Structure formats: C-alpha cells, structure tokens
C-alpha cells in the first residue's frame, strides 16, 4: 500500500500564476477529499468526490479554485490565478467509508504564493 | 457548521509525563476521531470512537467518548519524544445531505527529553 501520493511536495509561485496540485488516492478507495491547512483556520475541507463525482464543493473559497477527478486514480486541484492568501498546505485524502473516516491523508503540498 | 474546540492549544512536557487533552463540540456527535500530525506529514488516524461512554486504547493512548456526546478526551501515558506532533479531534458533520469530517484546530505537543 503506497498510501495517498501528492505532488509536488513544495510549490513556490508568483501571484497571478496558475497552480496545479495532484493527488493519487489509495487504490480501491472511492472517496477523495481536498483539505487546506493554515495556522489561522486549521484544516478546512474544500471539496470531496465519490466515485469520481464531486459531491460537495461548498468549501471551495472562490471561482479561482477548481478540482477534477477524471478517473479513480487521479485528481487535481487548480488555482488560477493564484494569490498570496492562497499560501497554505493542501492535503488530499481518500477513504472507502465516506466522510466519516478513517481518512488516509497524503503528505501535502506546501504552496507559497509571493 | 459544527465547531470543535480543542484544549489546550499547546503543551510542553517532560519525557515520561502523562498528557491529557480534550475536545468539545457545540452539538452532539455520533463519532469521534483522533488524529496525529507529525511535522511535514499528513494527519494519521489514532483512535475512533463510536459509542457514548466508550473508552478505547491504542498502546499508550486512551480516548473516551463523553457521555453527553459533546466531548471527547485523549490521554497519553508515559510520553516519549516521538509523541511530538499536533493532535486533532474530528467528527462528522451533516449539512445539506452531505456528510464530511470537521476538525478541531489541534493541540500541539512538545516533549522535552
């Protein structure tokens, strides 16, 4: 079991640039979640998918954020254009038991927007 | 949405000491989960609680589901340096037909050797 794999581990970009974060969930898991972690707000759920279909995107902060899951083994979170306040650690997590956990988290992507 | 309040926010202890932290909710939960996050990694599930009054152990860790269903406690006995990290409580929130986990803001634990 390779766990949830996220890439890149670190991303530094300039304001206005497009950022794409990637996630490969654990094979067999049918739920995928994107969380954002900041000191001020803690862990916030942005969006989650069930069987590749977006179920709840109410946590997506703005239209600048979008997420896709083209197949069961891959998801992307895109920010376009990026802003300094988007700086955070973004986690992907997967599970086979829905939103009640247990969630298996990746090691996150630390995004810095200058 | 539901809010989870964790206390204390941070703890600085000596190796060997016991640790106690708690989590309270503004509403009733049917499940309580405790996660640990180590530096540079994602949270990892430690203990899951599904029944009011339940007491569950995982090695030196013990967690309890409060009788009121609005709180939970996590205790660590005989702490060691590798216990360092941020401990999060989490519970399911149902909103608009969607179920999702909400997390507290964590208790940051530092263990001095």
Image: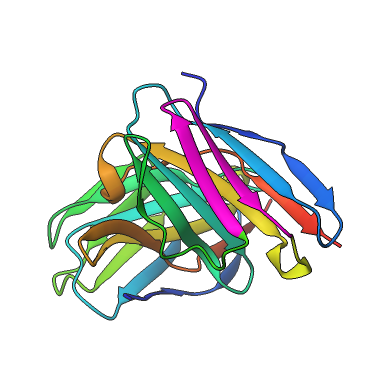
Residue depicted at 72% across the width and 70% down the height: A85
| Whether residue B23 is situated above or below residue B100 in the rendered picture | below
- Secondary structure mostly seen in magenta is strand
In the rendered image, is residue A41 in sight? yes
| Whether residue A11 is situated above or below residue B1 in the rendered picture | above
| Whether residue B84 is situated above or below residue B5 in the rendered picture | above
Viewer-proximal residue among B17 and B96:
B96
Question: Which residues, given as a range, are shown in magenta?
Answer: A65-81
Q: Is residue A64 left or right of residue A27?
A: right
Residue depicted at 60% across the width and 39% down the height: A107
In the rendered image, is residue B13 in sight? no
Viewer-proximal residue among B42 and A76:
A76
Q: Number of numbered discs present?
A: 0
Percent coordinates x, y for residue B82 in the rendering = 60, 43
Percent coordinates x, y for residue B30 in the rendering = 17, 61
| Whether residue A38 is situated above or below residue B33 in the rendered picture | below
Quadrant of residue B92 within the rendered picture: bottom left
Viewer-proximal residue among A65 and A59:
A65
Percent coordinates x, y for residue A2 in the rendering = 52, 20
Q: Is residue B53 left or right of residue A13?
A: left
The quadrant the N terminus of chain B occupies is bottom left
Report if residue A86 lies within the magenta region: no
Residue depicted at 32% across the width and 57% down the height: B100
Residue depicted at 25% across the width and 39% down the height: A97
Report if residue A66 lies within the magenta region: yes
């Amino acid at each position: 079991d390779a766990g949830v794999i996220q890439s890149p581990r670190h991303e530094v970009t300039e304001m206005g640039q497009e950022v794409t974060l990637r996630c490969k969930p654990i094979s067999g898991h049918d739920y995928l979640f994107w969380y954002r972690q900041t000191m001020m707000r803690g862990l916030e759920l942005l969006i989650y998918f069930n069987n590749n279909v977006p179920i709840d995107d109410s946590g997506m902060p703005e239209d600048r954020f979008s997420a896709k899951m083209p197949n069961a083994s891959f998801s992307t979170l895109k920010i376009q254009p990026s802003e300094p306040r988007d700086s955070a650690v973004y986690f992907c997590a997967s599970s086979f038991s829905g939103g009640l956990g247990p969630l298996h988290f990746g090691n996150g992507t630390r995004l810095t927007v200058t | 949405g539901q809010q989870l309040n964790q206390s204390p926010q941070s703890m600085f202890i000596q190796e060997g000491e016991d640790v106690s932290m708690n989590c309270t909710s503004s509403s009733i939960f049917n499940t309580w989960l405790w996660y640990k996050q180590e530096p540079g990694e994602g949270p990892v599930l430690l203990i899951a609680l599904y029944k009011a009054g339940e007491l569950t152990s995982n090695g030196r860790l013990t967690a309890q589901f409060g009788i009121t269903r609005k709180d939970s406690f996590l205790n660590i006995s005989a702490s060691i340096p590798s216990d360092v990290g941020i401990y999060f409580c989490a519970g399911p929130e149902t909103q608009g037909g969607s179920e999702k986990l909400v997390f507290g803001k964590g208790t940051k634990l530092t263990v001095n050797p």
